[in-house]
Image: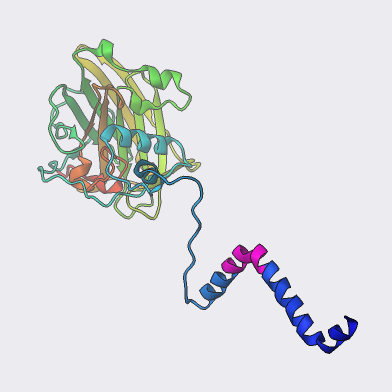
């Protein structure tokens, strides 16, 4: 036997190696196949796909896994989001959806600011009302009147407003009193936005609730025209003076604003500044809410956010009377 092995040693080794190969191939054939495919993929002769795991997904399950395409939101939702962004410096506005939202309705007639030395009286002669406020999409809203008059002494801006209300007892005033971040826009309130000009890197927002609570926001501009971030005002910032009284027919607001906050040293007859005025009727998140604006954003800002009155493109020029 040993003699036979010696004579056929090479053949015996070949047979042993062959049997070993057969055994290894039968045990590791799956791994060898995967390795072969991988080697082919490295030469770009085949392409690899991820193996399926678990049961097949239904159409509904696949829909959930797909990226969500952002579309234009409802006004109430959008306004709530942009409001949160105004009060929290860490929250920025989302990118605009592709679909444009515009309105071909007439633009607002250019308002005029008159020269006075202090807060004007409603009956003071020669001071005309600002044009009526409209809904953010440019349509009229006639349920209640909103009247604004604005004057200046060159250093300060004096804003008076009568927000007419047939049922003032139903006015919402609790949010500004109870909530830590005030959320004045969820009350019956007015909002005053001012900016020096279209090249400004910041603008100011003044909010006053019918409750008498006020709030100021100093917005710094980001790279996008419709985005801003609230920061702490500079040390020289002058906070506004305001007063709210209920009269027989609604609420009367008085607000005194320093123009130096937007970089205007002296406002003279013939000069202009940019403004946006807003009335929040019954807040912004109730079935009776109405957001009214001097310059409707769908007309001036091509707003993709609905009632986004912080869009700087919605600010428009207001002229100081030069007569």
Q: Position of residue 236 (x, y in %)?
A: 47, 41
For the C terminus, the quadrant is: top left
Specify the segment rendered in magenta: 25-34
Residue 319 visible in the snapshot = no
Q: Position of residue 305 (x, y in %)?
A: 29, 42
Q: Is residue 163 left or right of residue 255?
A: left
Residue situated in front as seen by the camera: 305 or 99 = 99
Residue situated in front as seen by the camera: 108 or 3 = 3
Q: Position of residue 204 (x, y in %)?
A: 37, 40
Q: Is residue 186 above or below residue 318?
A: above
Residue at position x 34%, y 28% in the image: 185
Quadrant of residue 292 in the image?
Answer: top left
For the N terminus, the quadrant is: bottom right
Quadrant of residue 275 in the image?
Answer: top left
Count numbered badges in the picture.
0
Residue 218 visible in the snapshot = yes
Q: Is residue 6 left or right of residue 15?
A: right
Residue at position x 51%, y 73% in the image: 41
Q: Is residue 32 above or below residue 161?
A: below
Q: Main secondary structure of the magenta part?
A: helix
Residue at position x 89%, y 86% in the image: 3
Residue situated in front as seen by the camera: 24 or 71 = 24
Residue situated in front as seen by the camera: 247 or 136 = 136
Q: Is residue 64 above or below residue 240?
A: below
Furthest residue toward right: 2
Quadrant of residue 199 in the image?
Answer: bottom left
Q: How is the image coloured?
A: rainbow
Q: Is residue 89 above or below residue 120?
A: below
């Amino acid at each position: 036997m040993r003699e036979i092995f010696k004579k056929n040693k090479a053949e015996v080794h070949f047979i042993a190696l062959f049997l070993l190969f057969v055994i290894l191939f039968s045990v590791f054939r799956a791994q060898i196949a995967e390795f072969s495919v991988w080697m082919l993929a490295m030469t770009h002769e085949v392409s690899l796909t991820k193996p399926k795991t678990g049961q097949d997904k239904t159409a509904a399950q696949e829909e959930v896994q797909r990226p969500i395409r952002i579309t234009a939101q409802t006004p109430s939702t959008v306004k709530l989001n942009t409001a949160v962004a105004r009060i929290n410096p860490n929250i920025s506005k989302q990118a605009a959806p592709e679909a444009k939202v515009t309105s071909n309705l007439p633009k607002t007639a250019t308002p005029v600011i008159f020269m006075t030395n202090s807060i004007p009286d409603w009956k003071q002669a020669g001071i005309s009302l600002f044009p009526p406020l409209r809904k953010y999409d440019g349509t009229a809203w006639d349920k209640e009147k909103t009247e604004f008059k604005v004057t200046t002494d060159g250093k300060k801006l004096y804003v008076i407003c009568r927000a007419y209300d047939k049922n003032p007892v139903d006015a919402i005033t609790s949010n500004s009193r109870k909530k830590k971040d005030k959320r004045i826009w969820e009350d019956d309130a007015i909002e005053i936005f001012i900016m020096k000009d279209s090249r400004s890197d910041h603008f100011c927002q003044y909010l006053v609730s019918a409750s008498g609570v006020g709030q100021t926001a100093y917005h710094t501009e980001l790279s996008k025209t419709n985005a801003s971030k609230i920061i702490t005002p500079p040390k020289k910032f002058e906070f506004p003076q305001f007063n709210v009284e209920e009269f027989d027919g609604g609420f009367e607001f008085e607000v005194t604003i320093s123009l130096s906050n937007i970089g205007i040293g002296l406002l003279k007859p013939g000069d202009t500044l940019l403004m946006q005025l807003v009335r929040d009727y019954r807040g912004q998140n109730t079935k009776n809410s109405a957001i009214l604006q001097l310059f409707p954003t769908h007309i001036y800002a091509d707003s993709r956010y609905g009632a986004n009155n912080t869009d700087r493109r919605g600010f428009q020029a207001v002229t100081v009377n030069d007569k």
